[in-house]
Image: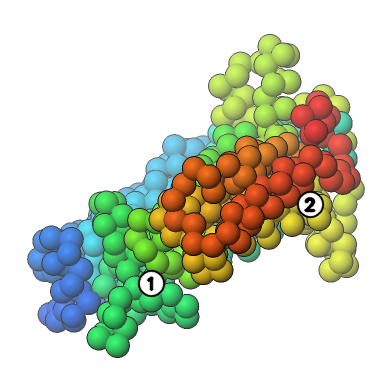
């Protein structure tokens, strides 16, 4: 049955062969080895990063695309074998696609066309290798078994509509990261920044965004960190659309992989936003938008992660091998079929399905507003030094954990705001930098409000089996 299904889905591998041929010819049709005349931005990047010559980097990109093209063709031919499936060849092609996305960053390509080519072709190779065809390594019992809705749950956490908010936010982050990466690589001469300055703008200095993405913090990374963020968002987009609505039990490894991309990397993204005014002294509007998109992804991804964890815990109790179940998935007792209308529903019903598992209690929305307010005390109360840095740090952490708590399965994270509130009450008497008595009262009032707002749980609409006891 699996071989027959494989034979009915060979066209992605043939298309991958065509992409391999495209890669083989790309360096010659896109002019990788043509006479190259660098502009001021590319010379600036070369000097700041102490990079090799342009000729050497273009040569390395040429060899990278040629060798990658050959590998894509070979692995696609092996994947398209009509007599047997070669799952390892599919995964090998996926890793070649990943390298194609990284190669322009590793070699610091000065060619915008090479950067675009690597990103687009790399993403397509991954999609054609493991996203569109039958996912290699999945167990037959998992694919043929049930259920769609986890036992004790009121809805399926892995439907297409449940993943849609994550996909939209990841796309926004990807487009922003591409712009930031293009500037860091020297492909464009400026980045849009409507609010924050970074130097003497009248003297031709950098704006806030440009200063931040070329700062020592950014240069601590061996590759362009903005472009690296673009790869992360691209991988999120790929993983969001993998498998069907039962993937919480058929592909536990993938659900965990997506959670790793969103949760820890979301925290890292918030960390970089936190240190911008403290360490660098300005802000980056595009970085703020991207960090917000990453933070909002978290509550929309938690329910699927919890369902996957419950499945693995259940399978362990049943005596199933943990690692085999983790990598190949399986069926599960109980549960039910998904009866939601999905994409044939009305727009209002689709929105309801897409946001199920996330509610918006006024207490959490007000906590988010307080967190945002705290980040502006430098302006509103002329706070400075340690006091201004404290308000900024606590404010963004309050925003982050309040957003996470919008997820019903993560509602308990709101209690983290209580110690933040206590600190806000005490900070005016412990830190320097207070310019006005109003700043003292601001800290006390905001702290008391955060403590009070963290106590009510807010409305919970759905049930989550054994996880219900943690929704307090």
Whole-percent x, y for residue 437 in the image: 58, 59
Disc 1 secondary structure class: helix
For marks 1 and 2, the one nearer the N-term is 1
**Quadrant of the snapshot with the C terminus:** top right
Q: What residue is drawn where x is 13% and y is 67%? A: 47
Q: Is residue 316 above or below residue 1?
A: above
Which residue is at the front of the view, 109 or 225? 225
Do tag 1 and tag 2 residues touch (Cβ < 8 Å)?
no
Q: Can you tell which mark lies on residue 208? A: 1
Residue 438 in the figure: left or right of residue 50: right
What residue occupies the far front of the structure in this picture? 437
Which residue is at the front of the view, 275 or 117? 275
Which residue is at the front of the view, 52 or 409? 409
Q: In this view, does 372 lie above or below 322?
A: below
Crowd tier of the residue under label 1, counting other residues whose Cα lies within 10 Å: few below 14, some 14–19, many 20 or above: many
Mark yes or no: residue 213 visible: yes
Crowd tier of the residue under label 2, counting other residues whose Cα lies within 10 Å: few below 14, some 14–19, many 20 or above: many
Q: What residue is drawn where x is 69% and y is 21%? A: 313
Dividing the picture into quadrants, the one containing residue 252 is top right
Rounded to the nearest angstrom, the CA distance separating label 1 from label 2 is: 33 Å
Whole-percent x, y for residue 185 in the image: 28, 68
What residue occupies the far bottom of the structure in this picture? 202
Disc 2 secondary structure class: helix
**Quadrant of the snapshot with the N terminus:** top right
Mark yes or no: residue 125 visible: no
Residue position marked by numbered label 2 in the rendering: 363
Q: Can you tell which mark lies on residue 382? A: none
Q: What residue is drawn where x is 72% and y is 42%? A: 451
């Amino acid at each position: 049955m699996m071989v027959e299904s494989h034979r009915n889905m060979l066209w992605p591998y043939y298309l991958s062969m065509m992409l391999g041929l495209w890669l083989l010819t790309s360096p010659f049709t896109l002019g990788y080895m043509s006479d190259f005349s660098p502009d001021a931005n590319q010379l600036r990047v070369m000097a700041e990063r102490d990079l090799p010559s342009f000729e050497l980097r273009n040569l390395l990109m040429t060899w990278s695309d040629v060798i990658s093209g050959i590998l894509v063709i070979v692995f696609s031919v092996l994947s398209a074998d009509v007599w047997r499936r070669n799952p390892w060849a599919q995964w090998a092609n996926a890793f070649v696609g990943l390298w194609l996305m990284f190669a322009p960053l590793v070699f610091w390509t000065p060619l915008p066309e090479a950067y675009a080519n690597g990103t687009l072709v790399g993403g397509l190779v991954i999609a054609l290798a493991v996203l569109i065809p039958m996912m290699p390594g999945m167990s037959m019992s998992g694919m043929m078994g049930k259920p769609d809705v986890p036992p004790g749950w009121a809805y399926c956490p892995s439907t297409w509509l449940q993943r849609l908010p994550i996909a939209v936010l990841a796309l926004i982050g990807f487009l922003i990261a591409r712009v930031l990466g293009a500037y860091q690589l020297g492909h464009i001469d400026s980045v849009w920044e409507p609010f924050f300055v970074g130097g003497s703008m009248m003297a031709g200095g950098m704006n806030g965004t440009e200063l931040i993405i070329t700062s020592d913090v950014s240069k601590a990374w061996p590759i362009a960190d903005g472009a690296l963020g673009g790869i992360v968002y691209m991988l999120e987009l790929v993983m969001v659309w993998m498998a069907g609505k039962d993937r919480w039990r058929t592909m536990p490894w993938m659900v965990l992989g997506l959670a790793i991309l969103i949760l820890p990397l979301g925290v890292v993204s918030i960390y970089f936003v936190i240190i911008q005014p403290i360490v660098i002294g300005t802000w980056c509007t595009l970085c703020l938008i991207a960090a917000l998109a990453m933070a909002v992804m978290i509550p929309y991804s938690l329910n699927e992660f919890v369902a996957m964890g419950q499945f693995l815990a259940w399978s362990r109790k049943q005596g199933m091998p943990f690692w085999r179940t983790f990598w190949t998935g399986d069926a599960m007792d109980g549960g039910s079929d998904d009866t939601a209308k999905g994409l044939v529903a009305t727009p209002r019903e689709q929105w309801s399905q897409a946001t199920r598992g996330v509610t918006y209690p006024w207490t959490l929305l007000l906590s988010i507003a307080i967190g945002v307010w705290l980040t502006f005390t430098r302006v509103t109360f002329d706070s400075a030094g340690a006091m201004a840095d404290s308000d900024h740090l606590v404010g963004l952490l309050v925003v982050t954990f309040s957003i996470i708590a919008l997820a019903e399965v993560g509602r308990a994270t709101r209690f983290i705001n209580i110690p933040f509130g206590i600190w806000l009450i005490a900070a005016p008497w412990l830190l320097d930098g207070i310019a006005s008595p109003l700043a003292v009262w601001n800290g006390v009032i905001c702290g008391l409000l955060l403590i009070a707002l963290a106590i009510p749980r807010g409305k919970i609409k759905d049930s989550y089996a054994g996880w219900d006891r943690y929704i307090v």
